[in-house]
Image (cartoon, rainbow, N blue to C red):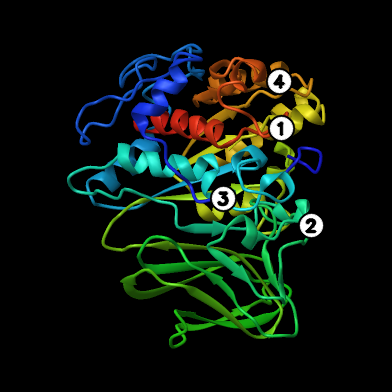
Amino acid sequence: MMQRFANSRYELLQMSAFRSLFAAIVSCCVISTAAAQSPPVPSTMAPLGGTSAPVTASGVYNFNSSALLHWRKAVANVRSGQGRGRLVILGESTSMGQGSGSGGTGNLNGAYPYAWPQQMASMLNTMLSSAANTQPVSANAIMCDQNVSAAAVGYAAYDTRVTLGSSWSTSNGGNCAGGNTFIFTCCAVNNLTFAPVAAFDTLTLYYYTQTPVGTATINVDGGASLGTITFGPATPDTIATATYSVANATHTINIVPTGGSFQLAGIVTSLSTKPAIDVIQAATSGATIAYFTANTYATQGLRLEATLAPDLTIIAETGNDSINQTPVAAYTASMQAVITNAKLSGDVILIAGPPNNAGFTFAPYVAALRSLAASNNVPLLDLTTRWTSWAVTNPVMPYFDQYHPGKLGYSDIALAVAELLAAP
């Protein structure tokens, strides 16, 4: 989080072993052992049809049957094989895995698969599996650079699925809800490549249409061009999409510049024969909640969120606001703006924490989130309750530093979120 907020392949802990570990430090929600066709319901949460719940030992507040109707519909569509859904995560460095990698500033090298949204997607894939759909969650996307450039870490070092040619950069002033767009600048022609882990037959590019102006072709595995994209000029500016069909297989996507300069926001891949929830991580290291209220450019917070139109948005923003001592009234107003915008297309879940050891108080911001959760009828996952404090959690699930969890901590956050999402 921030430069001050000192900014791998993921080894999934077996669920039974992990629950045993975490039970040693704090009460937690236990995954149901029912068959996959019946998603697990954490025991401390209100069941469907229940009433609004107070904060529990696992830190879940305002969980009730009416708060996640859009999400429940998306899950039902996916599990029955009838349609896709979309989940977007807006957050700071604790939502993009800072501290969980194998080196580099902020331990960001190789951190991407350890970020809690990525671990959560893997866990949720198991929890939501059904006879009709055994792969109901897909995390095969990129959306801007998560602002790793602020820590002088290249995106390809952070997310090894991606390579950036020498004429590509991501340091452009934080112009995207997920950090910075991927920019190609003149003149040496070299590619941006993206190699999702899972097979896909459909890819969708999200790109900026105003300035700079350039062109590129797209192919997979170095084969024939799938088409040409012209980036800009357009007034007013927009985020445009281009969708291509390919053979069902694992592929490497190549963005091949052919002229000028241009900005790419993201790529989402999918399998048309298997509906899934697309998980899109749009976290920004160093961001406060006000960052996500920007709407000057089509790639920024409110406008990109509207373009993505998720069925559920998870907003995890307290750390940097506490560090910067954002006035609580301003924090509340900005958070309300982001909630209101997100609810235009779907539901919202708020996350407070995790707690830190740097002397910054979370209490006023957690109180504001509880009030907003109640007034907007959205659930809140309070990690300051679930983890109690840095001092309690760190000896068992070590932090990377005073602010950022390590691999185990991010895995626990992932479990807490996955159980909440599986419960409806």
**Left or right: 294 as drawn, with respect to 157:** right
Q: Would you call the spot at circle 2 few (<14 residues within 10 Å), some (14-19), or many (20 or more)?
A: few
Please state which of residues 345 and 86 is positioned toward the viewer in this rendering.
86
- Identify which amino acid the numbered label 4 is placed on: Phe
- Identify which amino acid the numbered label 2 is placed on: Gly
Q: Quadrant of the C terminus?
A: top left
Q: Which of marks 4 and 2 is nearer the N terminus?
A: 2
Question: Residue 200: which quarter of the image?
Answer: bottom left
For the residues labelled 1 and 4, say whether their Cβ atoms are less than 8 Å apart.
Answer: no
- Identify which amino acid the numbered label 3 is placed on: Tyr
Q: Where is residue 188 in the image (x, y as percent from the top left)?
A: 72, 85
Q: Where is residue 114 in the image (x, y as percent from the top left)?
A: 53, 44
Q: Which of marks 1 and 4 is nearer the N terminus?
A: 4
- Identify which amino acid the numbered label 1 is placed on: Asp
Q: Mark 4 points at which residue?
A: 362
Q: Where is residue 225 in the image (x, y as percent from the top left)?
A: 47, 86
Q: Name the residue under label 2.
A: 173
Residue 92 in sight in this render: no
Q: Mark 1 points at which residue?
A: 401
| SS type, badge 4 | loop
**Left or right: 111 as drawn, with respect to 199:** right
Q: Which labelled disc corresponds to residue 112?
A: 3
